[in-house]
Every structure is written in C-alpha cells, then in structure tokens.
Amino acid sequence: MDDVASAKVRLPVARFRDASEASKRVAHEIARLIRQRASENRRCVLGLATGSTPIRVYRELVRMHREENLSFFNVVTFNLDEYFPIKPESPQSYHRFMNENLFNHVDIIRSNVHIPSGTVPLENAPGYCRDYEDLILKFGGIDLQLLGIGRTGHIGFNEPGSTRDTLTRMVRLDSLTRKDAAKDFGELDRVPLLAITMGVDTIMQSKRIRLLAFGEHKARIVQQALQNRMSSALPASYLRQHPDMQYLVDGAAASCLPPSIFGTSLQ
Ligand code: F6R
C-alpha cells in the first residue's frame, strides 16, 4: 500500500501495489470478523460478490481455512445477484461460481448459503425477492458486504437508473454489462437479458462495505463513482454516503484519481 493510504486514518480509498495485496487485506479483515464473532458465539453475515474481482479473496479465505483453522461454521452468506434465467449447474451461474471458488472448499453449513435463484418462476419473482430481503433482516443484516464494480457503474446488478431506495428485484442488464459477460457465455446472444440483484438500499444497509477494483479498465468508472455527482445514473456513487465503506484499488484502477483523493473526505 502507498505511503498516504497506509497512514492510520480510516480512508475511503486505499491504493495497493497489486490485486493480491488488496485481496489479502480484505480476506484478513473478513477472517478477523468471523473469528471475533465465533469467540462471542455469534454468527457472521457476509454479503458476497462474484466475477473476476473477488476470486483472490476467496482463494485466501480457502487457504486460511486449510492452513490456519479458519472455520466457516458460524458464517451465513448472501450473494448479491444471479443471472436470470440460468440453471445452478450452468458453467456461468453464480451458484456454480461460489461453489467452485469458495463453498466446496470450506466448512460452511450449506443451509447458511443464500444465492438469488436463477430458476424461480417469473410470476413468483416479486415474492421471492421480498423473501430474500426478509431473510437478510432475519439474520440481523449483513456485517460485511464485498463488492466489485461494473464498467456501467453498477454494484450488484444495479445498473444506471437504479435509485438509492431499490431493494432486491428482477432487473434488465445493461448492454455494456452483457457485452462484458459475452466472453463467459461464448457469444453475446447467450448472455441472459435479466438478473435478480440485491438493491442499492439492500447494499447500503450493510454494516461495512468493501469494494475492490482492479485493472485499467476500471479506472474511469472508479474515478466517476468517487467524484461525479451522486445519482442513479451511477449507482456506485451512492456508496459515498455509507459510514463504513472502503474502496481497495490497485495502481491501474487508481490511475484516473487525483493524488489528493487519498485521505480526503468524499462527500
Ligand atoms: C457480481 C456483481 C457485479 C460485479 C461487476 C464486476 O456478483 O455483482 O457487480 O462485481 O460486474 O465484475 P468483474 O469482477 O468480473 O469485473
């Protein structure tokens, strides 16, 4: 981490040497939280993301489970989103992603894992989404929400146009998001048009938010999310209102940010 960001102040943006270093930082924060809760006989509720960005976080958590006795016995998870429609066993499904990158390798209790359904009948989706919200509340809310950011400025699949008060719901994917997903699906036409996602408000209710962004292709949107006017045109901009939110970025993703942003108030 660079000199400014390593100062002992809680900063909203921390720049790291590379994605590995930033991912380890978040993984270790998650591990501390899990262990602290376990020592108090309490559960730890995690909000989880998929995509290329959090993979190293999951890798480090799996390593800590194997080598440092980190147990997921007290962990409850809620994933942000899932394509719709999609079968859980489909190679692009977020169910499969989470199993392959995390859940198959740790001792989490399967009934504590929650991922939005890609197969719920369309007419039942509104009720299903309300139940997802209720379940998060029943578990006492999300203690730490892990996020990536899409090039449209989406968090979860809250695309431009998603207002601050949105909750879990069915959404239409932005054309840029579908284009970015085309490599996973083989071709653009195979990328689903819809998804179920937690809303902006669902995410904002989390007690802590940690957003990771890596690579040059994220530089522009990171800069806009932090410096443009807060609005539904850029849903990630709402995160600036959160009292315990941190961006963890590598040098490439930080490349459009002015040096003065490290350590300044973002409001
Ligand atoms: C994934 C999610 C998305 C991704 C975003 C970035 O669950 O909610 O918001 O975080 O699209 O994706 P990657 O990490 O693949 O660049």
Image (cartoon, rainbow, N blue to C red):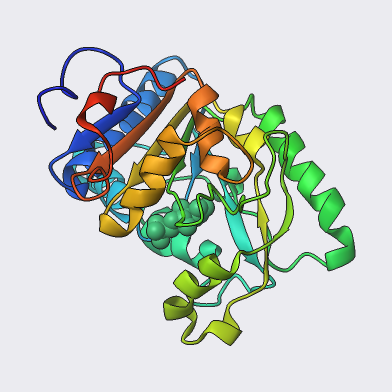
Report x, y in % for residue 72: 41, 39
Report x, y in % for residue 44: 49, 28
Residue shown at the point (38%, 44%) measured from the top left:
222
Identify whether 34 is placed above or below 194: above
Query: In the shown orientation, is residue 9 left or right of residue 183?
Result: left
The answer to whether residue 65 is seen in the rendering is yes
Identify whether 105 is placed above or below 232: below
The answer to whether residue 50 is seen in the rendering is no
Q: How many numbered circles does the render carry?
A: 0
Report x, y in % for residue 237: 51, 36
Query: In the shown orientation, is residue 188 left or right of residue 15?
Result: right
Residue placed furthest toward the left: 3
In this rendered view, identify the residue nearer to me: 36 or 217.
217
Identify whether 193 is placed above or below 215: below
Query: In the shown orientation, is residue 116 left or right of residue 34?
Result: right
Residue shown at the point (30%, 16%) measured from the top left:
10
Locate the N terminus and report the quarter of the image it occupies: top left
Residue shown at the point (72%, 34%) measured from the top left:
165
Report x, y in % for residue 187: 50, 87
In this rendered view, identify the residue nearer to me: 110 or 16.
16
Residue placed furthest toward the right: 123
